[in-house]
Image (cartoon, grey):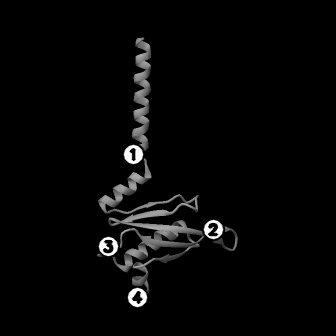
Amino acid sequence: MAFLIRLIVLALIIYLFYRLIRYIVDPKRKLDTALESGSYYFLDDVKNVRKNFFVALRGVLFEGEKYLGTTENAFEVVSISVWVENPDRLQGFTKEDFHFLEKEINMNYPDAKISWQNPVEQLMKHNS
């Protein structure tokens, strides 16, 4: 009987350790932490074109939708549409911030043309 209780306790400890590790390395938790702290975090599954990517920058959440197309040699992501989840939080953002985001997105998708949705689109066109 004592052996069975020890086995159950050991299994419980291993399970709790496993859940703790999964919690620590969870990308969505890291995204939420970056949003709260106002830091930068890029969450994307590069191998899955159907999944949108998320970018946290200075407490604002951006979401991007990827579109597959053809390049000279292969099928690649050729177009990306990016929008802001909460446009009210864009106060203080400059054109340089959006150029930084474009550069970071182009690091993963070099063949993609990035199009911004309103109100960022107006800023990028207005100051061109």
Residue at the extreme top of the image, as rendered: 1
Are the two marked residues, 2 and 1, in contact with CB atoms closer than 8 angstroms?
A: no
The image's mark for residue 126 is 4
Residue type, numbered disc 4: His
Q: Sort mark 3 into few (<14), some (14-19) or many (20+) by Cα contacts within 10 Å.
A: few
Residue hosting label 3: 88
Please tell me whether mark 1 sits on a helix, a strand or a loop.
helix
Secondary structure type for disc 4: helix
Q: Residues within 10 Å of mark 4 (few under 14, many from 20)?
A: few
1 or 3: tag closer to the N-terminus: 1
Q: Earlier in the sequence, mark 2 or mark 1?
A: 1
Task: State how far apart marks 4 and 3 are (Cα).
Answer: 19 Å
Q: Residue 98 got which mark?
A: none
Q: Nearer the viewer, residue 110 or 44?
A: 44
Dot placed on the residue nearer the N-terminal end, 1 or 4: 1
Which is closer to the viewer, label 4 or label 3? Answer: 3
Residue corresponding to mark 1: 24
Using a 10 Å C-alpha cutoff, classify the residue at mark 1 as few (fewer than 14 neighbours), some (14 to 19) or many (20 or more): few
Q: Earlier in the sequence, mark 4 or mark 3?
A: 3
Q: Residue at x 54, y 60 (%)?
A: 51
Would you say residue 80 is visible in this rendering? yes
Residue drawn at point x = 40 percent, y = 23 percent: 9
Q: Tell which circle, 4 or 2, labels the residue nearer the N-terminal end.
A: 2
- What residue type is disc 3 on? Asp
The quadrant holding residue 128 is bottom left
Q: Give the residue at x 29% y 75%.
A: 91
| Type of amino acid under label 2 | Glu
